[in-house]
Image (spheres, rainbow, N blue to C red):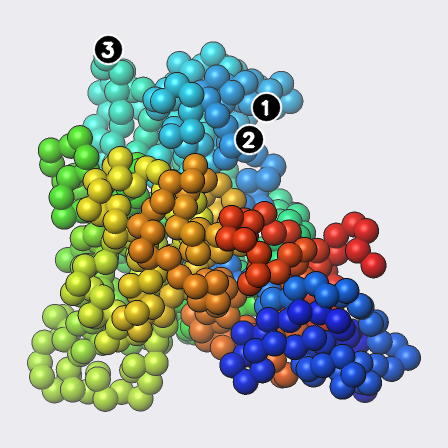
Amino acid sequence: MHPNLILTNGKIHTLDAGWPTASAVACLNGRFVAVGDDAAVGALAGPGTTVVNLQGASVIPAFNDAHNHMLEQGLKLSRVRLDECASIAEMATLVREAGEHTPAGQWIIGEGWNESNFAEQRLPNRHDLDAATTAHPVVLKRFFNMDVVNTAALARAGVDAHTPDPTGGKIEHLADGSPSGILRAAAKLFVRNLLPDPTLDECLAALESVTTVYHRLGITSILEPGLMPWEMQAYMTAHRTGRLKMRCNLMVSWHGFREHESEATCDERARNVGVFSGLGDEWLSLGGLKMAVDGGTTSHTAWMFQPFVGESVVRDYNRLNPAQLRRYFETGHELGWDIGIHAIGDRAHHESAAAFAAVLDGEVPSQPDAMRAVRLKDTPGWADHRHNLIHAYFATEDSLTWMAEHQIAAVIQPTFIYYEGDDVARDCGPELANRYKPMRTYLDRGIPVIATSDVPSTVWCNPMVSLYALVTRKSHKGTPVAPHEAVTREEALRACTVAGAWLTREERIKGPIAEGMLADLCVLDADYFACDAEAIKDIAVTMTVCGGQIVWQAPGRV
């Protein structure tokens, strides 16, 4: 059979050590069947082959955003978008406009605000939202771990001046003692638990619409972390009905990720589902268990060794009981699951790495006898895991040692460097800011690194922004953020493309542009390896190929 697609006259960066550059590729049955020069690859063309002359354009492997809440991002496209909101006044205007086409009494939901971007330089409150509408309950989700709601939403939730803070959360108050509308960490659940789940049809539409957007960015694979059964059903239905055009690996929600889930529920989910990490095909597969131990730095809800700047005590906003980390990890690991845990604060990072290391060493507190420890360590496949620390902001020397020894990966978000890097020193002080997302250190210590976006917990998922942030270590304001942790362009590109396949146990079929691998790539309007570093963030994708099919092509491209 002849290839269905051949690309020629390109400058192809394969990330395949055996053949790092090429000018042409051929695709058949969803795989690369030839990678080489124009003459050799072009000779494979037949009557039905589409041949595209790239006219010298740069080509790289397609992006694998291995921590991307794709379904939520798709749903967000139909909500009030606040990522680029520059003031509280603008926020109120957007809510007011949404209210004009939302029936009275129905929820208005918005996402993505960041008070650091507001001209007012303060947190919003319920009065700001009440000025926009009193006819609708309103909840506006900050980019992470904090919501602002209006008076109508507080009333529906039954939250007033006398409502106590929940465990792991905080209700902020105004000077008169009434709730301000700011709900931190677990306190978000007072209102969020009232929101209706999207319907299956809404989820399917969201997946389709966001896939189109992602293809324009060169993204062909994602890992969706922390899903509930109804969300996994949406992905399965999309796959079964032929509507899933993105390669998706699904992580199951587990301890700490959804604050409303009980320990018993999570234990039962991992034990009784009957399958574990690795099930599936090249389009939809089952990943690991998604956990979360703490919150975030800008919301002051991360688990730290020392208080945040301006605070005198370390507060407890943890989303699970840290004393149970080893038991959770032991349970998941023994059942065959890979485990990823949200760990942002320096103590969260340290304790999570310590717990992983203890389990992988066979030091299991719940079963302390020596014979069991030996048996665990000698179990076939015991060391074959893809456990990882998600976010991995601040590593301690001990955690670096444990991660290197046991190949515990760091799943980092360079988008945070770009969009939030200016806030790290403000919240955590200069010493920790100098250790923020230390990719250079991780690589130098032999620790696997996967670079991702984590949308919608950040502004946007453009991989070019991620590459720019890793190479230059600059924020969107041009501020250097731990510049000594910068990496090479190839290291950054590997972290954003091929590294994610290892995390999902697909490294044998996906990643580099090489014969036999899944035929996923993207064509750029500039040469990533040759352009000025400041221009990296502005590079655009002009064509995306997924499974050997052109799924996105910029207008005007031949």
Label 1 Cα crowd, 10 Å radius (few <14 / some 14-19 / many 20+): some
Check residue 80 in the rendering and tell me which mark sits there, or answer none.
2
Circle count:
3
The x, y position of residue 468, in whole percent, is: 48, 52
Check residue 327 in the rendering and tell me which mark sits there, or answer none.
none
Tell me the distance, in whole angstroms, between the alpha carbons under discs 1 and 2.
7 Å
Give the residue number, with chain letter if any, for mark 1: 98
From the viewer's perspective, is residue 438 above or below residue 152? below
The structure residue drawn at horizontal position 11% and vertical position 36%, both measured from the top left corner, is 313
The structure residue drawn at horizontal position 50% and vertical position 75%, both measured from the top left corner, is 506
From the viewer's perspective, is residue 340 above or below residue 127? below
The x, y position of residue 337, in whole percent, is: 36, 72
The structure residue drawn at horizontal position 48% and vertical position 47%, both measured from the top left corner, is 455
Disc 2 marks a residue whose amino acid type is Val
Q: Nearer the N terminus, badge 1 or badge 2?
A: 2
Q: Secondary structure at mark 3?
A: loop
Tell me the distance, in whole angstroms, between the alpha carbons under discs 2 and 3.
30 Å
Give the residue number, with chain letter if any, for mark 3: 176
From the viewer's perspective, is residue 288 above or below residue 452? below
Disc 3 marks a residue whose amino acid type is Asp
